Amino acid sequence: MFKDKIALITGSTSGIGLAVAESLAAAGCKVMLNGLGTPEQIDAARAQVASHGGEVDYNSADLSRAEQVEAMITDTLKRFGRLDILVNNAGIQHTARVESFPAERWDAILAINLSAVFHAIRCALPGMQARGYGRIVNIASVHGLVASAEKSAYIAAKHGVIGLTKVVALENAQADITCNAVCPGWVLTPLVQRQIDDRAALHGLSIKEAEQAMLAEKQPSLRFTRPEDIGEAVRFLCGSGGGNVTGTQIVLDGGWTAR
Ligand code: NAD
């Protein structure tokens, strides 16, 4: 199913994206990585994914720029000849109440977390439609389904990603092209570590106490979802059991949205 499939995973130099890239590489895909980082971090990510076997390459597109998103798709097609699996994963966060939310942070979050998803899909679809095959997975969030205070831009973007996912699914429903969202609750990655550190500093807590407080507030399982769990969900959606799953969400949130 995955042997020699071509997969592009945005934001795969860290956290969830890196785990998804590893999961797809381990299944047999050739992988194009993307994301920010120092040359050492990028080399480490490449080596980690390559250790599963198969070809790995890296594209340095800054996804806040539409023309770089377009060039990333063109580069992937040039490098590997086609694109079978597109995982839109890159994302950033900023927390502040709406009245003090910096407009520049709003623009950056909307550009990276939502517009880049649109541009990548827009540029990837013609090739998928010509070949009659494609799997698109958008890493949204529980915050694409429900809200929390102080995350207006992130939540607006993630709700937008869920809506976009449904439209792409409908427009391609009769081709063998699916588009789905994965919605994690808390996953312990650098993006969440920064929020834990801020909470610990604000309330004078240890890192462990801040982690537990964060989980207790939202995630009834009191456990973080693991990055590799997201990798497995993506593999399901792109695997043989996922062929007629489209326009929907897989939620890995330890019960967050059940209450
Ligand atoms: P992370 O900070 O570990 O990784 C984010 C990735 O995006 C990195 O590779 C980074 O380089 C890349 N990135 C950021 N800005 C970029 C830009 N301008 N151009 C290219 N790449 C860029 O974060 P993560 O927790 O692994 O998050 C991955 C995705 O999962 C995000 O979309 C996030 O919203 C979503 N998510 C995370 C959690 C969680 O609890 N960690 C929960 C729900 C959803």
Image: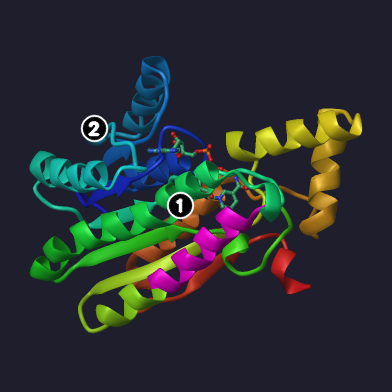
Give the residue at mark 2: 57
Report the predominant secondary structure element of the magenta stretch: helix
Residue 117 at x, y = what percent?
36, 56
Eye-nearest disc, 2 or 1: 1
Q: Which mark is residue 113?
A: 1
Q: Secondary structure at mark 2?
A: strand
| Colouring scheme applied when the structure was drawn | rainbow
Three-letter code, disc 1:
Asn
Q: Amino acid at mark 2?
A: Asp
Which residue range is magenta in the image? 151-165
Question: Can you tell which quarter of the image residue 76 is in?
Answer: top left
The residue at label 1 has a CB less than 8 Å from ligand 1: yes
- Count of labels in the image: 2
Magenta run includes residue 20: no
Q: Is residue 95 left or right of residue 34?
A: right
Judge left or right: residue 52 versus residue 184. left
Is 54 situated above or below 9?
above
Query: Which structural element holds mark 1?
Result: helix
Q: Quadrant of the C terminus?
A: bottom right
Question: Marks 2 and 1, how far apart in space?
Answer: 23 Å
Residue 206: image quadrant is top right
Which residue is at 15% across, 40% downward?
A: 75
Q: Is residue 159 magenta?
A: yes
Question: For this view, does 147 lie left or right of residue 245?
Answer: right
Task: Please say whether residue 258 is visible from this viewpoint.
Answer: yes
The tag on residue 159 is none
Q: Is residue 135 above or below residue 90?
A: below
